[in-house]
Each structure stands twice: as structure tokens, then as C-alpha cells.
Image: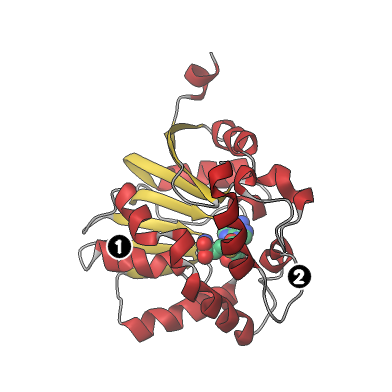
Amino acid sequence: MKKYSVTVTILCFVFLTSPSSGLTWQEQEHQHRHTGLEHYQEREKRYEDRWYWQMPQHVMDELGIEQGMKVADVGAGIGYFTLKLSKRVGETGKVYASDIDENALTYLDERRKATGLNNITIINGREDDPLIPKASVDLVLIVNTIQLVKEKTVFLVNIRHSLKENGKLVFIQWDAEKMDPEMPGWDSQDRALYTLHTMLKIIYGAGYEVLEIKDFLPMQLIYICQPSDISRTKN
Ligand SMILES: C[S@@+](CC[C@H](N)C(=O)[O-])C[C@H]1O[C@@H](n2cnc3c(N)ncnc32)[C@H](O)[C@@H]1O
């Protein structure tokens, strides 16, 4: 992981420091609700540089996202991945974008209309259930969100019902090992939220198993999971 440290420091400085807020980036994540249009515009602006550490096209290639697939972006926010997934799956595919932040979803809806993408369904989720229709999707994607969900097990069990047979649950999650403790905006007190150990506890605790962990992103790990028989995994 050390090989990334210089790159990560530079990338994170660019991404994580917000000129107007002075908040740690974790605080910025928690601050997302009850804020106005300006907040979302600022977030969209920050995302302009996100491609070089998020590598969305490469991520979608690695996840096998193709035309015609049905996918869900849970904790979609203003739709960084939603819009890219929508283009990738095309007219024969479908993207469900769920979040609990209605303002973010309204903003996403405007972006969707502006791009003319009509394969996106926006869902006002519940804290403990993103409300994706049953057995409807090949893949559920959760990016930088699970740490914010209070009832993680219930939430992930509810997601399980939305997966088709052989459907996958994918987390793209910050990884504490890749973060430099001196990095501006990184609050080391939250480190435990972003460890491999924490993620595995969340995943296996909710009745999933990890098929593969992809490690090519500079600040995050990608966990590809599928529902498991819990008793088989434990014994
Ligand atoms: C850091 S943002 C990430 C947004 C998006 N996934 C991305 O990568 O750009 C976290 C998102 O999770 C959402 N969120 C937090 N708790 C949630 C929950 N229980 N259910 C659904 N979304 C939730 C927030 O509203 C916010 O939009």
C-alpha cells in the first residue's frame, strides 16, 4: 500500500479540502442533508476531478457492467455513478438510484433530465431500506456510503431481496490503509470505520460472502459480494 502514499496525499489534498467549508471530509459527508442547492453544485464541481482517482470506466469494466444490465446505485447522492451506469447499460438496461437525501435526489433528477437519460428510476429510500424492487437487479453498488448507515445489517438484508439470482452486491469503500494520517481533512479518529476488518464484519454479518477484493484504486477497495448461506460460512 505504501507505493500509493505520495499519490494518495496529492489526490486527497485536491479532493478532500473544500475551499469554503474548513470541515473534515467526514464532517462534509454528514453535513450533506438540510443544505441548499449551492451545496450540491459545489459537490458536482468537486466531482469534475474525481475521475482520476475514482476511475469509473475502469471500475465498470472490472465489474462487468454491460448494455442491458439492471443495476442499483444505493446512496446515490447526486448521481456520480448513476449517470455513468445509465450510459453504460443503455436503453435496454435500467438504473435505480436510491438515497435518503431528497434534496440530492432532486438535484440528480435535474441532471438526469438535462442529459436526457431515461433509464433511471429515482427512489426515496428509507434509512433501513433502499426500497429497490424485489429480484430486479443484477448488481447493487454502494459507494462511500455504508459507514453512514445506522442499521447496516437490516439495510443489507433488505438489499438482498432486490438481487436477481446470481446478483452481486459491490461496495467501493475508503480504505484506511491507503490514507496518510497527515493528510489534510482526514480525521484519523474515524479510521476504524474504513478498515478491511470492519468491512468484512459488516459483509459477513449481513449474510454475504466476499468473492473478490479489487485493489487498483488509490484510496478505496472494491468488495464484490454475493449472498451466502450464513451457517455454511460460519462453520
Ligand atoms: C458520501 S455520499 C456518496 C454518494 C455517492 N455514492 C458517490 O459516491 O458520489 C453518501 C451518500 O449516502 C447517503 N446515505 C446515508 N445514509 C443512507 C441510507 N441509510 N440509505 C441510503 N443512502 C444513505 C447520503 O445521503 C449520501 O448521499
The answer to whether any part of residue 86 appears in the image is yes
- The residue beneath circle 1 is 94
What residue sits 64% from the left and 66% below the top? Answer: 13
The answer to whether any part of residue 144 appears in the image is no
Q: Amino acid at mark 1?
A: Lys
161 or 141, which lies in front?
141
175 versus 208 height, above or below:
below
- The residue beneath circle 2 is 23
- Please state if 153 lies on the left or on the right of 105 as rendered: right
Q: Amino acid at mark 2?
A: Leu
Q: Quadrant of residue 27?
A: bottom right
Numbered circles on residues, count? 2
Report how far apart the C-alphas of labels 1 and 2 lie in the structure.
36 Å
222 or 204, which lies in front?
222
Across and down, in percent, residue 198 comes to 64, 37
Task: Please state which of the two labelled residues, at mark 1 or mark 2, is closer to the viewer.
Answer: 2
What residue sits 76% from the left and 50% below the top? Answer: 188
Q: Quadrant of residue 211?
A: top left
218 versus 97 height, above or below:
above
